[in-house]
Amino acid sequence: AMVAPNWFHGSHQILYVVHGRGRIEVVDPSGERVLDEELEQCSLVVVPAFYPSTKIASSEESFHYITF
C-alpha cells in the first residue's frame, strides 16, 4: 500500500512509526529527491514545510504511523 504524496505549506510534519516497517520518500520543492529511507518501529522523521512526501508499506509487514 502507498499513501498519495502530500505536503504541508504552513508547518513541518513529524512522522512517528508505531508498528511495522515501510519506506518514506521526500522531495524538495523543485522535485529533487532528498530522502528515500526504510523506516521501522520507533523511527521518527521530520519533514520540512513545502517538502512533498509519500509513505510506502513493506510487502512483508503492516506500516502504522502517526503524523503531527
Image: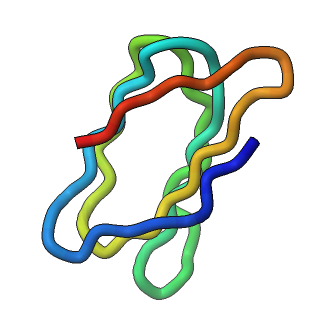
Instruction: Return the residue nearer the eye: 33 or 60.
Output: 60
Image position, residue 52 (x, y; %): 45, 68
For this orientation, the residue located farthest to the left is 10
Image position, residue 43 (x, y; %): 41, 21
Q: Quadrant of the C terminus?
A: top left
Q: Residue at x 41, y 82 (%)?
A: 29
Above or below, 29 against 51 in this view is below
Above or below, 3 against 38 in this view is below
Instruction: Return the residue nearer the eye: 65 or 21.
Output: 65
Above or below, 39 against 51 in this view is above
Res. 61 image quadrant:
top right
Image position, residue 66 (x, y; %): 36, 32
Image position, residue 2 (x, y; %): 70, 48
Q: Residue at x 56, y 65 (%)?
A: 5
For this orientation, the residue located farthest to the right is 59
Q: In which quarter of the image is the N terminus?
A: top right
In the image, taking residue 10 as reference, residue 64 lies left or right, namely right
**Visual colour scheme:** rainbow
In the image, taking residue 22 as reference, residue 68 lies left or right, namely left
> How many numbered marks, from 0 up?
0
Q: Which residue is drawn at 60% across and 14% down?
A: 20
Q: Which residue is drawn at 59% across and 39% down?
A: 37
